[in-house]
Image: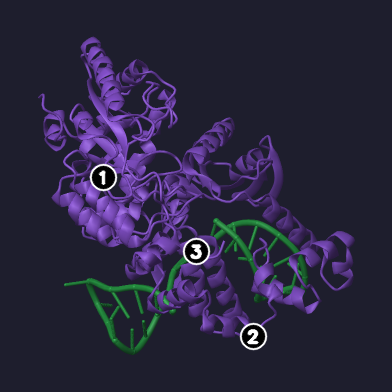
Amino acid sequence: MKGSNADVANLLKSVATAITLSKGNFFEIRAYNSAADAIEHSTSEIKDLWQEGKLGDIPGVGKSIQSYLEEYFKTGKVKHFDSLLGRHPAVIYELIKIPGIGPATALDLSKIGVKSIDDLKEKIESGKIIKDGLSEKLSEKIGRGLLEINSRTGRMLLPYAFSQAEKILEYLKKSKDVIEASPLGSLRRMVVTIGDLDFAVSSKNPSAVVDHFIKMPGVKEIQGQGESKASIVLESGLHVDLLVGEPDSYGALLQHFTGSKHHNVHLRSIALDKGLSLSEYGLRKVVSGKSLESGEVIHCKTEDNLYEILGMQTPPPEIREDTGEIEAALIKGLPGLVNLKDIKGDFHLHSNFPIDSSHDYGTGSPEEIIKKGIELGYKYVGLSDHAPALGTHTKEEILKLIEKRKKVIQELQTKYKSIRVLNGLEIDIASDGSLTVPEDSLKLLDYTVVGIHTGHKGSKESITKRILTALESPYATILAHPTGRLINERDSYDADWEEIFKIAAKNKKFLEINSYPNRLDLRDDLIRMALKFGVEFIINTDSHSVEQMVNMPFGVSVARRGWATKKDIGNTWDWKDLRKWFTITKES
DNA sequence: GCCGTTTTCGGCCCGACTGTTTTCAGTCG
């Protein structure tokens, strides 16, 4: 899709390829590839960042690439890029999308007459490509690459990746040669979507572990296999990488494979400044710019060892994106991020209480939700069913429904004294910014979760005004899923976030960090920006079944990626502090 | 092209695996 992260990353990779083939500056090529990589793996849509004027926040995207991307988003093309790309056959930029094919191989293929990916496929299947001069082995390798792009599923949601990783971890640990095993990469950094699954293992016998790994049930293809690493593709299309190292240097291995790439590159330059060369084996002393092959290696058993030798704190994996964490760690100024165990409750929970047939109900009863809250160790839970719509009910009917529901909740509160049960509703923000529940009904509630559920494509001005108006209501408590994005489905709204954050902080309105797997909204980069305005958050699960209440860790990880600390998150507070923000609540 | 409390000029991360041109270039993470 034009303008998507994948599309922009492809464009920049093509430019890097064009410069490579024109024998351009090596570092310029690297800069384009590096920017492409950061964009491909960004947690937010690049188009959103452009609209919000935040392109420069992406590591590796400097002034030049920013202005080219401006041009790309405004006009759909970049003149400078077109002239670079035009120097080589267009098919090259298609071919480099195939794993295993880089600029050099793509150029070779174009020279022997390959016209398109389909053409390549046909020539490989018929064996014609070998007659044209390609080696048999390379032909096979490219054939495997072609199979891979067909089965490639795109990036998966974090919780799904988690469940898959668990199964693989279980299998890995069956080998007696596996001492420790950890899922790493973007999974450990808790990125909202995951491309591949990465695992590190410590072992005294790496090749035995590699052997065990490639024999995992459901392996469709072995893409690479060496002494200490291997890559496989499962029947499901899932791509899994393994890296094995000695127990003595497991810390260095964890660090290396956790990334991100930009964090690692920056870290290695910090190491070099200290006369040390950093790799997955540990740190090595460097003499006059050249590393000593047989020189002394400082093994790092843990990540803490490694970062300590570099004179810094260990940044939590979630913030290793080279967006300032290294600088902060060097001056021992990392924030103490919020933890799952700090969470004392959940305020966005849908029950099966029959209140409005125009929305989907939750599947659990209010009582089951309360019991689950107690099981999770919560001090408070808020029930927030969708409000009855004014169109389908009269004002009087709505009032009756809400009175009836209030009574049910009060009875349950009497029954379950160990947890505070709050009576809330999730309410639509109408197109004029008003809340779609009449005032006499609102007065019966303890709090509200207000959000936009229709008209996502409104203009920046109209969406901003709509949200700002809602934030002025004395009955609004929490702004639900603030950007409205659905990962892989729908982009964020275009809105003036600075203005929204300013007013949310001023009016003491919580912004939600929604833990629902395809929402994870507010996004991490906007959380970090909102914190500068003094905004406070509530992390909710938006559960539509009791089982979904365990999704809280994903919201917490988004908060951590946004550098939020415990005090920034309302539902880590004691009720006596929190209730001051629940302005509708009259009782103590 | 990116980046900066040792630099706005002058540096720029590290290693494994693959295939082949048996000492190295290409590709990848």
- At mark 1, the secondary structure is loop
Q: Is residue B7 left or right of residue A552?
A: left
Q: Which mark identifies residue A87?
A: 2
Mark 2 Cα-neighbour bin, 10 Å: few <14, some 14–19, many ≥20: few
- Residue of label 3: A37
Q: In this rendered view, identify the residue nearer to me: A3 or A223.
A: A3
Residue type (three-letter) at the residue carrying disc 1: Ser
Residue A561, position as x, y percentages in the image: 34, 50
Which residue is situated farthest in the top direction here? A415
First reached walking from the N terminus: tag 1 or tag 3: 3
Residue type (three-letter) at the residue carrying disc 2: Arg
Residue type (three-letter) at the residue carrying disc 3: Asp
Mark 3 Cα-neighbour bin, 10 Å: few <14, some 14–19, many ≥20: many
The colour mode here is by chain
Residue A470, position as x, y percentages in the image: 24, 47
Q: Which mark identifies residue A305?
A: none
Q: Which chain is rendered purple in the image?
A: A
Q: Quadrant of the N terminus of chain A?
A: bottom right
Residue at horizontal 18 percent and vertical 53 percent from the top: A503
What is the distance, in whole Å, between disc 1 and disc 2 at their CAs?
Answer: 56 Å
Please say whether residue A434 is visible from this viewpoint: yes
What is the distance, in whole Å, between disc 2 and disc 3 at their CAs?
Answer: 24 Å
Q: Which chain is rendered green in the image?
A: B
Q: How many marks?
A: 3
Examine the rendered structure and indicate whether residue A30 appears above or below residue A190: below
- Residue of label 1: A434
Label 3: chain? Answer: A
CB contact under 8 Å: marks 1 and 3: no
